[in-house]
Image (cartoon, rainbow, N blue to C red):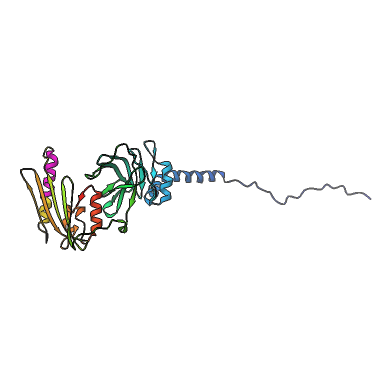
Amino acid sequence: MEENKGSVEPIVLGKLKKQKTSKPAFVIISLAILIGVCLGLPAINDYLKKSGLPFVDYINSFFNKVDGEDKIIITKESIITLTEKAVINYDMIELSEISVKGDTVSFTIKTRMNNLNLDDDTMYLEIYNSTKTLVRRVKLMGIITSAPEKRTVVFADAKFNAPTNYLGRMYRMTDEEYDKVSFGSPVANLTCSNANHTYTFTFNSLALKMVNHRYTLLDTSNMELYLEKLSYYNGASKVIEKLPGCTASAAETAQGLEYKAKIDLAKVTKEDLKDYADYNYYVLDKPAKIVKYEMKAQGYVCK
């Protein structure tokens, strides 16, 4: 029998194609994401700075420097040595170049926002001695912006010793923390004065009802400042004297400029005073303890 010697030929069922990789597409997408993040970092950083979150301030403290010095993040419980190189960041407010000498406290203040009205707040710079005993609070007030502003507060009844290493922090007070005050009768006056201003507050049952304000400028050596103040208080007197329950006058005397105003808070508001609203006029029924404390924290002597 003859053997079948036919060859076995392979049968092709199909072709397996090599799968193409998407490495070029992956690289392009990754590069686009990286570029987007880099371009967006300034906006992200600005947003986080304005968030006011404590952990964000803590993270920023590692990256943001001022003249080679670390920014010091202040919590409610912490205090630091006050020097001209120290920087305090707390709740969107930054204090730097802090000086405590003689009868004067000076500092530079700004905000990480576009602007911030501290008149709506109860924020203070607290000053402690080397044994961490509170010796003075300085009221932080007015409108601050992102541009640094130098401020000086003079305390006629204080004397800061030059060799002392003073400590400090920023602190927001609550109504319950203000020292209580008492007068000899339900209706009483409190007079607070500094070099140029005298405010006499009239209270009834410890609630503010009226303010008398006297301003004098006897130094005429700086004529530009003198004329500026004369124009301002002339304008103030014209507005205030027309308001119900109020009187005002501005006059040049032999000694210099003298301005007087009486504000009946039961009949007018700060909106009525327009551009001449004075923070120290306060509002009707403002507690006497807050008025006295804030005035002293501005450098006024009250009695």
Q: Residue furthest front?
A: 184
At x 42%, y 41%, the residue is: 63
Which span is picked out in magenta? Answer: 222-233
At x 45%, y 45%, the residue is: 37
Q: Position of residue 257 (x, y in %)?
A: 9, 45
Q: Residue furthest right?
A: 1
Whether residue 146 can be seen here: no
Residue 131 occupies quadrant: top left
Residue 254 occupies quadrant: top left
Q: Nearer the viewer, residue 214 or 60?
A: 214
Q: Position of residue 2 (x, y in %)?
A: 92, 49
Please, what is the dominant secondary structure of the magenta stretch? helix
Is the residue 70 above or below the residue 259 in the image? above
Whether residue 110 can be seen here: yes
Q: Nearer the viewer, residue 270 or 157?
A: 157
Magenta region includes residue 232: yes
Q: Position of residue 89 (x, y in %)?
A: 36, 46
Magenta region includes residue 295: no
Describe residue 158's horizontal placement relative to residue 29 as left or right: left
Residue 127 occupies quadrant: top left
Q: How many marks?
A: 0
Describe residue 33's horizontal placement relative to residue 184 as left or right: right
Is the residue 204 above or below the residue 104 in the image? below
